[in-house]
Image (tube, rainbow, N blue to C red):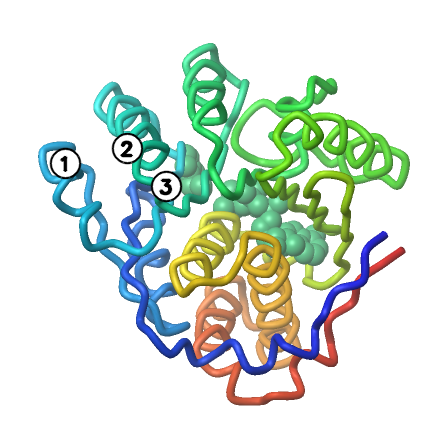
């Protein structure tokens, strides 16, 4: 397992340059995703109108693509934007929501992967499908069986094989343990609380945070590790403040924590990599 240089993480926020992040995402969590980008100092622009993509690409710093809620238009938009990103070298995160649960999501996901985004992320079930491992997941959520010790080990091994073919891409598989792989490097992170999985959008938010860090000029490896750690420790803080007050209360406290956690520089001491 690789060491992570967490010493540098406490100086990343607030971001100095307000990166502009173009998000083509789902309309279930779109507002939360936009606000999360703002909370860490980025500027979101949500656009699903392909007529303006070319001119938006002139001014944006990074792109966030989320397969989320499928439609013919969304599929066309994601294909066009990923092609444009490839041509213009726009730093891109793709969230493979529901990859492989239908033929449409499988084909779309594969087409986006072929444009070599900087970060390909999904929950452990989605990432198992990407690397050709079996999973019983049916919808957009992880299957519980995909988070056992032996399945984590199996997924890391398979991700490294795929990452060898695409060495410039960072692959992220989320769950109780988050896995980050680039080439032969791998880090496992063990922060977070199970309440983060009791409402929709945590996966979408962490992808948007990654895109914001990419837009601010950080590399894909740092952007991934930072975003996972920051989101999960915000979740831990929220848990200690709002547990037992209902899931919606927890969700709001968690979003608040996203906006304030960075002012407590010692939050980085809570990062828990596992070997
Ligand atoms: N049981 C858990 N324990 C610790 N952390 C968790 C847990 N569940 C989710 N998380 C954290 O929440 C974030 C999102 O992970 P998850 O695998 O739930 O994504 P997702 O399925 O794409 O989410 P969503 O579909 O709700 O947007 C990750 O950073 C992960 O570490
Ligand atoms: C519930 C749901 N369905 C498609 S996307 C989404 C939100 C989480 O990504
Ligand atoms: Mg989830």
Residue extending furthest top? 103
Residue 239, image quadrant: bottom right
Residue at image position (65%, 46%) is 174
Q: Residues at badges 2 and 1 in contact (C-beta under 8 Å)?
A: no
Residue at image position (63%, 43%) is 172
Can you say which quadrant of the picture contains the C terminus?
A: bottom right
Circle 1 residues within 10 Å: few <14, some 14–19, many ≥20:
few
Q: Give residue 229's position: percent from left, percent from top.
A: 64, 65
Q: Earlier in the sequence, mark 3 or mark 2?
A: 2
Q: Which mark is residue 184?
A: none
| Residue bearing the label numbered 2 | 84
**199 in relation to 53, above or below:** below
Q: Who is closer to the viewer here, 18 or 230? A: 18
For the residues carrying marks 3 and 2, which lies nearer the camera in this image? 3
Residue 2, image quadrant: bottom right
Q: Who is closer to the viewer here, 88 or 1? A: 88
In-image side of 173 versus 272 (left or right): left
Q: Give residue 248's position: percent from left, percent from top.
A: 46, 64
Residue at image position (41%, 76%) is 15
Mark 2 lies on a secondary structure that is helix
In-image side of 83 versus 48 (left or right): right
Q: Which mark is residue 49?
A: 1
Q: Give residue 257's position: percent from left, percent from top.
A: 50, 77
Circle 2 residues within 10 Å: few <14, some 14–19, many ≥20:
some
Q: Earlier in the sequence, mark 1 or mark 3?
A: 1
Q: Which mark is residue 89?
A: 3
Mark 3 lies on a secondary structure that is loop
For the residues carrying marks 1 and 3, which lies nearer the camera in this image? 3
Residues at marks 2 and 1, CA–CA distance in whole angstroms: 14 Å
Q: Give residue 8's position: percent from left, percent from top.
A: 63, 77
Q: Is residue 111 visible?
A: yes
Mark 1 lies on a secondary structure that is loop
């Amino acid at each position: 397992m690789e060491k992570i240089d967490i010493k540098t993480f406490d100086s990343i926020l607030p971001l100095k340059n307000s990166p502009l992040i173009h998000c083509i995402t789902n309309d279930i969590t779109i507002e939360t995703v936009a606000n999360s980008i703002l909370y860490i100092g980025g500027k979101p622009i949500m656009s699903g109108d392909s007529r303006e993509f070319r001119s938006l690409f002139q001014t944006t710093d990074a792109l966030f693509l989320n397969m989320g809620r499928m439609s013919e238009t969304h599929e066309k938009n994601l294909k066009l934007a990923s092609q444009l990103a490839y041509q213009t070298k726009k730093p891109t995160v793709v969230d493979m929501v529901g990859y492989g649960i239908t033929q449409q999501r499988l084909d779309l996901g594969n087409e986006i992967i072929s444009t070599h985004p900087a970060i390909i992320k999904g929950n452990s079930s989605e990432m198992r499908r990407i690397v050709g491992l079996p999973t019983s997941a049916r919808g957009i959520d992880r299957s519980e069986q995909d988070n056992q010790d032996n399945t984590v080990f199996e997924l890391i091994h398979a991700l490294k094989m795929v990452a060898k073919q695409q060495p410039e891409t960072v692959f992220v598989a989320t769950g109780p343990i988050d896995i980050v792989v680039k080439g032969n490097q791998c880090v496992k992170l063990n922060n977070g609380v199970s309440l983060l999985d009791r409402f929709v959008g945590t996966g979408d938010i962490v992808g948007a945070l990654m895109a914001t860090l990419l837009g601010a000029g950080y590399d894909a490896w740092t952007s991934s590790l930072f975003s996972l750690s920051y989101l999960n420790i915000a979740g831990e803080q929220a848990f200690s403040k709002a547990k037992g007050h209902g899931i919606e209360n927890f969700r709001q406290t968690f979003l608040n924590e996203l906006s304030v956690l960075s002012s407590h520089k010692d939050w980085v001491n809570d990062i828990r990599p596992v070997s």
